[in-house]
Image (spheres, rainbow, N blue to C red):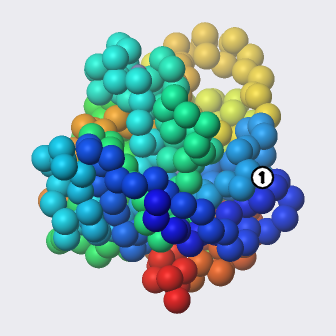
Amino acid sequence: MTAIKAYAAYDAETPLKPFSFERKDIGEKQVQIEILYSGVCHSDIHTAKGDWGPAIYPLVPGHEIVGKITAVGSGVTKFKVGELAGVGCFVDSCRTCHSCKAGDEQLCDEGMTGTYNSYERGTKTPTYGGYSTSITVDEDYTLHISDKLELSGVAPLLCAGITTYSPLRYLKVGKGHKVGVLGLGGLGHMAVKFAASFGAEVTMLSHSPSKEADAKKLGAHRFALTSDPKVMESLANEFDVILNTVSADHDYNAYLNLLNTNGTMIIVGIPSTPAVIPAATLVMKRRSIMGSLIGGIAETQEMLDYCAEHNITSDVEVINMDYINEAYERMNKSDVKYRFVIDMASLKQ
Ligand code: NAP
Ligand code: ZN
Ligand code: ZN
């Protein structure tokens, strides 16, 4: 067993606090990773606060993990000690269902094993995430990380990056497409970077007027303030694709009306209240709504390689571990530029 320092939510109400636990000895096909940076995703907040139902407490969040391999099991062939490695939102899946075989392990029929708030397959041992000093993961669920990019900016690619890259690729977004990105936070800022990089014309749809200059720096061609009814009216039937990253409850219909004929709204944000959508909103313009969940291991590696080649990283505010509760409060107020990333050295001190 290895003793691990971490931060955990002990319940849905109180702030996160220090927590210690033990990880099992490294298995034959596992790698042990010393965590250097861990990104802070809004899903960490939803889970810790019980927005999606009761969590397994104490809960150690964190599924945007980068670090250095410190040990490998005897059967490991893909990684060596000393190499950089990444872990995203899941650490295992059934490996045999249609989705797993197709490389969509995140959509596993039996449910993926989450990096946190799950149990290790076939056991009652909870999985603990990246707000911790070290993690042990099967090599098949571990990603290779290039040493070309600034590591703190790479961590958010493991969730915010793949969650926005995957559906844009699925819809073959590129030159000639008009894309609206709804919500400029962790996911939204990566969506702007990818959509612009793929050649689309990108409009930032935001309810925060202060983010206009940043949206343009990130690659958006236009900024539209969604709280201004005149702006919303002027954008009716405008977009081929809207990537909806909003974390809070909101009216989908106002944004569906901005889709042109055959337009698609990709839902990646996961508010807790179900939405009501009148049939006519979809029927009258042959619009559709699709959901998308992160991405499989092979596609995540493809995305990481794409980022290394095109020099794409997340814009981050690096924080110490003990700033986490303030970071959560700021994210709930949409005050993040554009991803908090924990420097795990601050937990080791
Ligand atoms: P985030 O960094 O906190 O950003 C969310 C953004 O949503 C805010 O910055 C804000 O942008 C907008 N927003 C917040 N409250 C709003 C409101 N009341 N009305 C309108 N807009 C509002 O969150 P994130 O980490 O990007 O995550 C976003 C969502 O995606 C969360 O629900 C998360 O759980 C989910 N998620 C899903 C997946 C998946 O695989 N599907 C993966 C990761 C995360 P503006 O200030 O620009 O309006
Ligand atoms: Zn996430
Ligand atoms: Zn499966």
Q: In the figure, is residue 14 to the left or right of 169? A: right
Nearer-the-camera pick, 278 or 151: 151
Residue 348: x percent and y percent? 50, 82
- Near mark 1 (Cα within 10 A), the count class, few <14, some 14-19 or many ≥20, is some
| Residue drawn where x is 76% and y is 28% of the image | 274
Q: Amino acid at mark 1?
A: Lys
Specify whether residue 85 is in view. Answer: yes
Q: Position of residue 158 (x, y in %)?
A: 39, 53
Q: Secondary structure at mark 1?
A: loop
Q: Residue 257 occupies which quadrant of the picture?
A: top right
Q: Residue at x 66, y 19 (%)?
A: 281
| Residue 222 appears in the picture as rendered | no
Q: Nearer the viewer, residue 238 or 273?
A: 273
Q: Nearer the viewer, residue 227 or 134?
A: 134
Q: Give residue 174's position: percent from left, percent from top.
A: 27, 39
Residue 291 screen position, x and y as percent: 53, 28
Given the current orientation, which residue lies at the most extreme bottom position?
A: 349
324 sits left or right of 337 in the view: right
According to the picture, the residue beneath numbered tag 1 turns out to be 49
Ligand 3 shows up in the quarter that is: top left
In the image, what residue occupies the spot 73% across and 38% down?
52
